Amino acid sequence: MSQAERSLRFLLRSTALVGIAVFPSMATAADWTGAVSSDWFTAGNWSTGVPTGADIVNINTATPNAAVVGAAAAQANSLRIGDGTLTIQSGGGVSSVIGYIGYGSGTTGTVTVTGAGSSWANSGDLDVGEQGTGTLTILNGGKVSNSDGYLGRIDGSTGIATVDGAGSSWINSGDLDIGRGGSGTLTIQNGGMVSNDYATIGGAGTVTVTGAGSSWTSAGLLTVGRDHAGTGTGTLTIQNGGAVSSDTGRIGKDSGTTGTVTVDGAGSSWTNSGTLEVGYDATGTLTIQNGGAVSNAIGHIGYEADSTGTVTVDGAGSSWTNGGGLHVGNSGTGELTIRKGGTVSDSSGYIGYNSGSTGTVTVTDAGSSWASSSHLFAGYAGTGTLTIESGGVVRNLGGYIGFQSGSSGTVTVSGAGSRWHNAADLYIGNSGSGTLTIQNGGTVKVVGAVIVALNAGSTGVLNIGAASGQAAVAPGTLDALGVTFASGTDRIVFNHTASDYTFAPGISGAGSVTVEAGTTIFTNVKSYSGPTTINGGKLVVDGLIASSTTINGGTLAGTGSVGSVTVNSGGVVAPGNSIGTLHVPGNTTFNVGSNYEVELNAAGASDLIDAVGTATISGGTVQAIAAPGQYAASTQYTILTAAGGVNGTFTGVTVNSAFLAASLDYVGDDVLLSLDRINAAMFNNAGETPNQQAAGAGLDSVAVGNTIAEKLALQSDSAKRAALDQLSGELHASIKTAGLEDSRFVREAITDRLLALPAADAPNFWIHGFGAVGTIDSDGNAAEFGRTTGGLFVGADGVIADGWRLGLLGGYSIGNHDVPGRVSSASAESYDAAIYTGFEAGGLGFKLGADYAVHSIVTDRTIAFTGFSDENVAAYASRTAQVFGEIGYKFEAGPAWFEPYAAAAYVSHSTDGFSEAGGASALTAEADTLAATFTTLGFRAATSVDLGEATGTLRGSLGWRHAFGDTTPTSTVAFSGGELFTVAGVPWAADAAVVDLGFDIALPGGATFGASYSGVISEGGYDYGAKAELAWQF
């Protein structure tokens, strides 16, 4: 309906109302009494009989009976429900010109239209809550129709309408006004339907459309939030599958009013064939959530200059579809939030459309998206801000940030998964001011070109990480072929926290690059001609930049080419990525307070600045960074060459090692750096013991650049010696002594077994358990070594010839070793396999055996001195092989016997090579083998004891054990990259007393049990143990 048609209709309707009011005598008044029944058609229920279509009908009472129209057609001219109730049911119908519910101030009226075929038809208006309180309920297929409809039309009135159930309808051929001056509430539910031309929810109006099939259709404009007094509030809720459709939607129309619309739940929808304006000239809020959907042609948020509009699209399945453009901040203030999987689409997106407007869009959370089939403008003519974060995605054809002159646009893409996809070009500052910030793993993809500050007067800034002056954050990625600086003021800022960020796109034009924090790597050609300024962080140029570079507080590095270089106070040039050459086609300048960081190595290689122009040196310091290695007595390096000549000198030179002295020379067009080796034997000279000196020599061989050496160089000589003891790794040598000493346990087990043999020739099975604790004293070089061990041997033997027995043995043992003075410890698991034989005839006895043992060793060493701590562990294998024999002659005297004996053993112990796992102090050890020969001269005696039902034997022995040759174990080790050195462990005893005291008992059934104490006692230590043996004869 056109506006002219609406005006004519309003005039005719007003004339009719005035006629009824001015000429009441032309119509008869019929008042409901309900004196007889509830039946409308009973004359006794009316003051003047059953009303006709010419009568003014007043229903002002519900007692004694409320009015009911059923199964017939009632008529009225003006139907006025004051303090009364009317029910239309059972297919009954009422026809009237005008209807009122709650007619008159202070009245309460109710009309219910229920059931299929039941209807109330008004050829004119229907006013629910005319001056009082009116309630209209349409349910179970009932129908109400009228021209214009009102709920709470006049100030102080209240109008309530409920349309409930499939087939229930309220048809307004004209407009529907909900809460015009009073309070109006409309509920459409369970499939109910309402339709009208224009609709307004204002004053204090509330509409709820809920349930699948429930619908409200406005052929014209639907306004939420309108009031003639300028203070109205309108609320529309569409939920649980309800549907609203209109030509144009307007939320918050009149200044001072507030409109709120919520579309909630899957299937819930608001469809506008025309535009949708959220905040037309007031405050408007639209929330689309939990799968709700809104669609329209063009969308506006914050339409007029003083308006404020807010739209939130929240949750998976929630959508706002704009067939045309979307203006966030058209002329006023607009805010759009897309989150938790919500989606928005349009043909073109505008944030801050007109001059003076402000638009803000936030797309946040995975699954949330905004798609524009054409261009997206952040700051078209006003101020626009777009934030894409936490996995949100925005897609469009071309992107513009700061489009028109005077506009301002800001875009931030932040967070892993966050993405802005531009299928064409991206302009950062087209004619206005534009800023793009990519941070925290966000990505901007540009299929076309990235143009910064396109037109004269524009400003464009690309921030990787954060803007200048802000705290650095993690960078994001610009996925584009290149960045072009154009005609305005433009720059790229790198202010991030990454240590290896590569900026892949090319850069061209006359803009500038600023590095504030983080390490940024240029790997390809950057042909831009504007200045590069490094205020912090590091710029690594492995490609080419043509611009001049000024270093104020950060570092310039790389192996590429830089147009010219100026290093100011606090700035650093460090060519290469380790050792490399930085090329400078122009001039190089070092000012007072500047730094030139030069990496170099023992092979004679160093960093180099290769300048085509001049090198002007007005001070500054050369910082030599020597790599670990074995340096010659003197090495010279070329660190700067300038074809145009070298002018001036550096203030000084430093080197990072206490073992090198650095100096500079200026020869022709070159600057030379010389390193001279000093303190070449610092640690060897500091040592006093052989182990200290050996470890010192090993450390001296890797001193330059070695973490341990550089820190230990600062310590006193006494502190150096204590540290060298820990560093030496003597534990690995001392463990070998334990391996040799512990070889005695299998010899003793076999000897004890052969001594305890019964007279019978039957085979025997036996078990031998042992345990021991011992300490070997320090010899003044290696520290005191403590150990405990225990294990079990299992054997079997039998007679193989006259007087000869042959047996086999297997065993397992575990030992723990400790060197408290070196904060070192170890454990060893051992597995033995042996064969033995014995012969005895006429007092003469022979015992022979051979054993092979495999040891699994785990070590742990702690190194700690001022400024340094480390822990090194290792796991490796060793093996012990031995052969042994004994001869003795037994003299018997009754129940006792006495036997002098002589024994010998040859023991070989081999250790695999290994490397410790740990830090800088970890050692690598070579494989080695050592051997020892032991002889023992002694005597043993025993006597039988009668224990009644059993026979026992008391026995004991005493011997002198002698070890031949060198008794000190060694290990050959090296620090990483260093020379081998040899350290010694605690020695095994050259001479020792061997003691054994024990007893044996013959048990019933051919079994024998024995136990004894054994010990090895020497001047440098002791080893005490206990043994027990159980044998069975078969």
Image: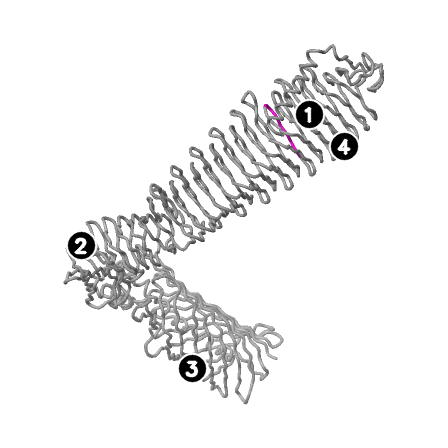
Residue depth check, mark 4 versus mark 1: number of the one nearer the observer: 1
Please report whichever mark, 3 or 4, sits nearer to the chain's N-terminal start: 4
Q: Is residue 208 within the magenta segment?
A: yes
Residue identifier under label 1: 147
* Residue 45 badge: none
Q: Is residue 157 left or right of residue 557?
A: right
* Residue 616 badge: 2
Circle 1 SS class: loop
**Marks 2 & 1, CB-CB < 8 Å contact:** no
Residue situated in front as seen by the camera: 923 or 455: 455
Residue depth check, mark 2 versus mark 1: number of the one nearer the observer: 1
Q: Is residue 12 left or right of residue 867?
A: right
Circle 3 SS class: strand
Q: How far across and how far down the image is residue 38, in percent?
A: 82, 19
**Marks 3 & 1, CB-CB < 8 Å contact:** no
Secondary structure character of the magenta stretch overall: strand
Please report whichever mark, 4 or 1, sits nearer to the chain's N-terminal start: 4
Q: Is residue 30 within the magenta segment?
A: no
Q: CA distance from mark 3 to mark 1?
A: 134 Å
* Residue 901 badge: 3
